[in-house]
Amino acid sequence: MALWGGRFQAGSSDMFKQVNDSLPFDYVMAAEDMWGSIVWSRALCKAGVLSNDEQQQLESCLTKLKSQAENGELDFSASPEEDIHSFVEAALTQELGDIGRKLHTGRSRNDQVATDFRLWCRSHLDSIRSDCSSVIKALLKVAARHDGAIIPGYTHLQRAQPVYFAHWCLAYVEMFKRDISRIDDLQKRLNQCPLGSGALAGTTFPVDRYEIASELGFDSPCLNSLDAVSDRDFVLELLFNASTSMMHLSRMAEDLIFYNSGEAGFLQLGDSVTSGSSLMPQKKNPDALELMRGKCGRVFGNLQALLVTMKGLPLAYNKDMQEDKEGAIDSVNQWHICLCIAVEVLDSLSLNEERCRLAAQQGYANATELADYLVEKGIPFRTAHDIAGQAVVKAISMNKALEDLSISDLKAVHAEIDDDVYPVLELEAVLNKRNILGGTNKELVTRALYVELERLDKVI
Ligand code: ARG
């Protein structure tokens, strides 16, 4: 039964129910709604609205419903109720009669939904946070498994300079660390309690909003009733955080898809995260990675959709705001699935170290070293850059690597080049010379890896 029937003579049309009802998706907040109601019943009791006995009956019924909801024992699909708030009130009233009809005193679905959804976001962000930590752990594990492996580093998808594979892993570790810190920032802003703000103007019943907030694990109550029921910044921030993190997953997926390609052949993926072709028997496709990349579309779309929905909404609550949920629920689900599959992909991955090394040696990725070598001989960098470029042209024309040119070939490019250039052009030398914070020097990379492993041990 609708919560608002008194001034209506006719019922809702089927089509209206289709557009209006949110129970088909907001049932996911059932446990949060019931927890909020338990705390509200206590506040009403302290305010003298409910007797102790009434409050206890409500609390025990709500506690039972909450555990049924958590165990997946409630059937929401058969219910005619319009949303999760009406569903819970109907269940209470069926069980307790008039006592159930007292619970909504001083409360509105507007402050109720804002509270429920904050609770839902808070707990889901907690588990996403630990999913991000698992991805970090998987990156560190695969880096340690292939400690010392070298891959080409790219700019413009052209081989640029070699890097340790662990350095590549640690780059993504930094990104997922930032995703976690964005979650932590959001949790602070999100953790204020709207309950007690009524429909928009506060409530006349003397409930203790500080106590309500603290019982629900919030840091404090929201300070303005109009803002409390109208604010969906926390959903937008969640959607932005999901989008940024999905973008990181997608870039990682794109790198791995390329490394896994027949052309690069740097790595193999496990059978458990790849699929075959119905026609071409030889195929083993990186579907998990493609979907991590592909699902960005809907996750970014959900952010855009809610921004557009919120733009221009007058204060306070408008039904448009019910549109905040499906996108956010979907984004959180996809984000969770993609973080989990990223772990499986990284765990299953094995690097073809020999092939990576060969690729890192090719493509004149040590041309910068030749220029730096000439700089050390007193030649201005711009001139040195030019000379090294000429050496590359010569090497290409002879179909050789720079280090395979004879000393007379090199001297023909510039007289200052001597035999001592050869050790400078060696692969490990190229990496280790970047002995600067954040650079590719082996010791620095290994140290960074162990710092992260230790840090993770402490936080998990
Ligand atoms: N289902 C609604 C939502 O998700 C609950 C709030 C309804 N409030 C109202 N005044 N109709 O936004």
Image (cartoon, rainbow, N blue to C red):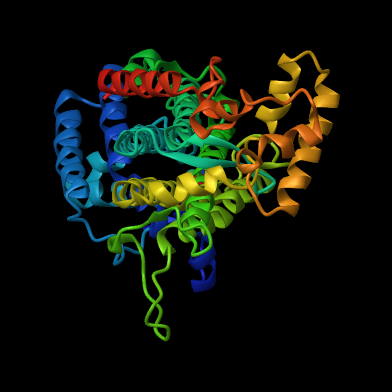
Which of 369 and 4 lies nearest the eye of the viewer?
Answer: 369
Give x and y (percent) for residue 31: 27, 42
311 vs 236, left or right, is: right
* 155 is higher (above) or lower (below) than 428: below
Q: Quadrant of the N terminus?
A: bottom left
Which of 55 and 441 lies nearest the eye of the viewer?
Answer: 441
Which of 46 and 347 lies nearest the eye of the viewer?
Answer: 347
Who's the residue at 33% across and 15% down the image?
211
Give x and y (percent) for residue 23: 39, 56
- Whether residue 371 is visible: yes
Residue 19 figure quarter: bottom right
Which of 262 and 107 lies nearest the eye of the viewer?
Answer: 262
Give x and y (percent) for residue 437: 54, 15
- Whether residue 86 is visible: no
* 80 is higher (above) or lower (below) than 136: below
Who's the residue at 61% across and 53% down the image?
301
Q: Quadrant of the C terminus?
A: top left
Residue 133 figure quarter: top left
